[in-house]
Image: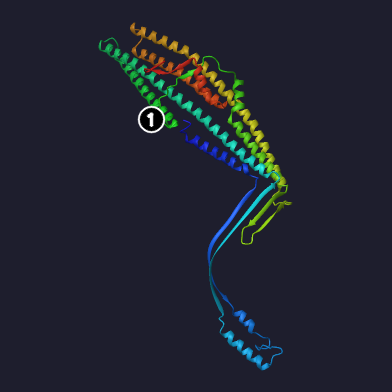
Amino acid sequence: MMQNSPKLAAAHAFESAKQLQSEAAKGLGGPSLILNGTAARYRVRGEVDVTDIKQHALSHPSGGQTSLQGIDPALAGLLNQASQRIAAHIPNEFAYDHRGNTHHAAVAGFWPVFDGGTTKAAKNLIKARAEEAGADTGLTSNELNSTLAERYFGAQLARMAAGLHDQSVRTIARYDHTAKRALEEGLIARVDRLEAQAMFENAKRDAEKAHNDAALAETALSRLLGSPVTVKPSTPIFLLSKPIEPLEYFQNLALQNHPGFKKVHAKKQQAEALHEAGKARYLPNVNLFGAYDMGKKPSWIAGVNMTWTLYSQIDRRTMNRASAQQIIQAEKSDEELRDNILLLVEKNWRSVENARADYIRRGSNIKLAKEVLHLKQAGLREGVNTVAELMKAETEFAKAKTERAKSANDYVQSLAKLLESSGVPEKLSDYESKADVKLFMKNGIVQ
């Protein structure tokens, strides 16, 4: 069942993910080394507007005539005219189209040598979440073990009940045949024959219903086990006629093994990690860094960086008080869980003892029902009792045996719940091997 349960598979996958995250976070706080490399081919196209440059070169505060000191004014005029003609042939825009290849490589390193405990708190938080996931897997596994016991032995009981009804139908069928012959020979009244027929039909209807219930129980078991075919239970319903271990034994097991305590403990560790991370906000961060640019003219840089938040927009003191309250919450949850689990263990332990005592008491009920049946059989031979009364006695006898088998099933179900609440559901098979009472079907008869 454990291999085919989607619910347990999902829990295992979640736990595995958290464990892998915890493994991946072990390097937090260590150095980082980054290699950055670039290789590219490019093409750059565009236009450069030189209109402003031309106007600035030809402009003069005296209205466009450039005055050249020490030069004959006539010559200067010729130069100005020449510059105007040259400028007229210079375009207002220059177009460019440049293509090429480029490459670049650099190495950078970073090492947070002091962070006030933030890294340690983060590691503890991730680890605690992985432990919580493991506790959830344990809870799921225990729940499935208990469900398996419930459906497995429930199917076994349903099949036994169907077998007991079949036995009753076979016996009542003989009584019905006897009543039919007696009516034909005039030994009984017609009303007695009709009563016998009604009892026979009721017995057949009850047997059919019992078989349908057994088929449904076996289908539910097969679905739980992920089996494409109907599963026929082979392990008998069992019971220990002597009392099991005392209550304190199972309560101690629960305190040591119940996954619920591991889950609450993991929750507390998470709260403590968050509290430590909050305290680290008051301390500075110191980092070592360096970089090396591997170009034609290599360059490098190395240094120390320190940051210290002196004032934060978030009230760090209030945040610390909040995380401290989460620690208190986890501690109180542990106390509440302890009380609830100890109470649950006691409830299940008493249910086991009640079922055991009920099974033993019902042994006398079977003896009484069997004795009544014998008396009714003798009464029928002597003409004191009717066939219908004998059939009713047979039905009550089968009912007494069914109810005793149900008491044995209640014992197993309660024991499975007791072991689940104690954190050791896998020990159910140990009690089955020690049981001195075992009920099972053999050749259609309850043994």
Q: Dot 1: few (<14), some (14–19), or many (≥20) neighbours within 10 Å?
A: few
Q: Which secondary structure lies at badge 1? A: loop
287 sits left or right of 349 in the view = right
Nearer the observer, 319 or 172: 319
- Between residues 392 and 190, which one lies in front from this camera angle? 392
Residue at mark 1: 229
Quadrant in the picture for residue 278: top right
Report whether 331 appears left or right of 47: right
Say how the picture is coloured. Answer: rainbow
Q: Residue furthest front?
A: 296
Q: Is 363 located above or below residue 349 in the figure? A: above
Could one spot residue 315 in this view of the protein? yes
Residue at point 64%, 82% (across, down):
57
Instruction: Depth check: give the residue in front, 122 or 23.
Output: 23
Position of residue 168 measured from the top left corner of the image (x, y, whole percent): 37, 17
The quadrant where residue 158 appears: top left
- Name the residue type under label 1: Val
Give me the residue at 55% from left, 32% from top.
Answer: 139
Q: Position of residue 319 (x, y in %)?
A: 69, 45
Q: Is residue 336 above or below residue 77?
A: above
Q: Where is residue 47 drawn, in percent x and y?
A: 55, 74
Task: Give how far across and how far down residue 56 sits, in percent.
Answer: 64, 81
Nearest the viewer among 71 and 349 is 71
